[in-house]
Amino acid sequence: MVTIFSKTNCASCEQAKNVLKSRGIEFEVKVLDKDYHMEELMDKLEEVGLTGFRTFPLIVQNGKGFTFNMINDIQ
């Protein structure tokens, strides 16, 4: 399962969802300040090895983190 950590009014987040949908990849979406808080995201970034990450969305699959620029690596 793929999880997209997003925020409201995020064009890249919407693009990520559209790319994954078009590729037939199932995902869940978590929205900042609704489903999680920034502190939780910082913990998740450390967990998946993306400590320098500063843009949205963060995409996680099987414990590995991806940025939007890495979306083609998701299978």
Image (cartoon, rainbow, N blue to C red):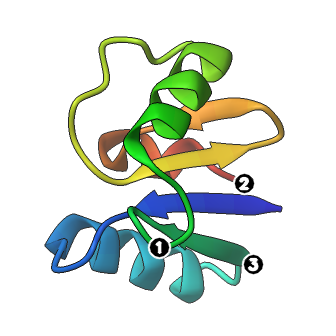
Taking the spot 53% from the left edge, 87% from the top edge, the residue there is 22
Is 3 left, or right, of 54 in this rendering? right
Q: Secondary structure at mark 3?
A: loop
Q: Secondary structure at mark 2?
A: loop
Q: Residues within 10 Å of mark 2 (few under 14, many from 20)?
A: few
Residue annotated with mark 1: 34
Placement of the C terminus among the 4 image quadrants: bottom right
- Foreground mark, 1 or 3, reads 1
- Foreground mark, 1 or 2, reads 1
Three-letter residue code for mark 1: Lys
Residue annotated with mark 2: 75
- Which residue is at the front of the view, 8 or 28? 8
Mark with earlier residue (1, 3): 3
Q: Secondary structure at mark 1?
A: loop
Three-letter residue code for mark 2: Gln
- Which residue is at the front of the view, 67 or 52? 52
Residue 44 position by quadrant: top right
Mark with earlier residue (1, 2): 1
Is 45 left, or right, of 13 in this rendering? right
Q: CA distance from mark 2 to mark 3?
A: 10 Å
Residue 59 placement (x, y as % from top left): 53, 49
Residue annotated with mark 3: 26
